Image: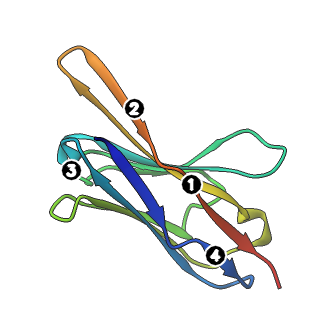
Amino acid sequence: QVQLVESGGGLVQPGGSLRLSCAASGFSFSTYAMRWYRQAPGKERELVAATSSTGGVKNYADSVKGRFTITKDNAKNTAYLQMNRLKPEDTAVYYCNAFGWVGTTKYDYWGQGTQVTVSS
């Protein structure tokens, strides 16, 4: 059974930090690229950060560049999103996503989401 379980969300003051975790099971995690998305109330889901299957290639949305870091630990089947210097506009539900191919078939898995609230 495929599972992606996010954790680490919560309430933090502006300027603070959080680290989100995404624990994966039920598929070959090391062969999948990982992405973090977020969705704020009334807004579309936004791609925040992405990394290749090896973790060697990383991309970020302009809004988080220099503040967020995505990592992927294939030995632990876990992806992380380190979020520093958080702003109120970072408030959203954050989702991890695993994306990969087996032969010619694309696979796309999602976690249930974790709430991040940045407020004083």
Give the residue at x 67% y 75%: 86
Identify the residue under disc 2: 108
Identify the residue under disc 3: 54
Q: Which of the two labelled residues, at mark 3 and mark 4, occupies the earlier sequence position?
A: 4
Q: CA distance from mark 3 to mark 4?
A: 28 Å
Q: Residues within 10 Å of mark 2 (few under 14, many from 20)?
A: few
> In the picture provided, is 54 more to the left or to the right than 115?
left
Q: Which mark is residue 113?
A: 1
Q: Residues within 10 Å of mark 4 (few under 14, many from 20)?
A: some
Asked if 60 appears above or below 26 in the picture, the reply is: below
Give the residue at x 73% y 38%: 44
Q: Disc 1 on helix, strand or loop? A: loop
- Identity, as a three-letter code, of the amino acid under mark 1: Gly
Q: Quadrant of the N terminus?
A: top left
Q: Which of the two labelled residues, at mark 1 and mark 4, occupies the earlier sequence position?
A: 4
Q: Disc 4 on helix, strand or loop? A: strand
The percent coordinates of residue 19 (x first, y second) are: 48, 75
Count of numbered labels shown in the rendering: 4
Q: CA distance from mark 2 to mark 3?
A: 17 Å
Identify the residue under disc 4: 10
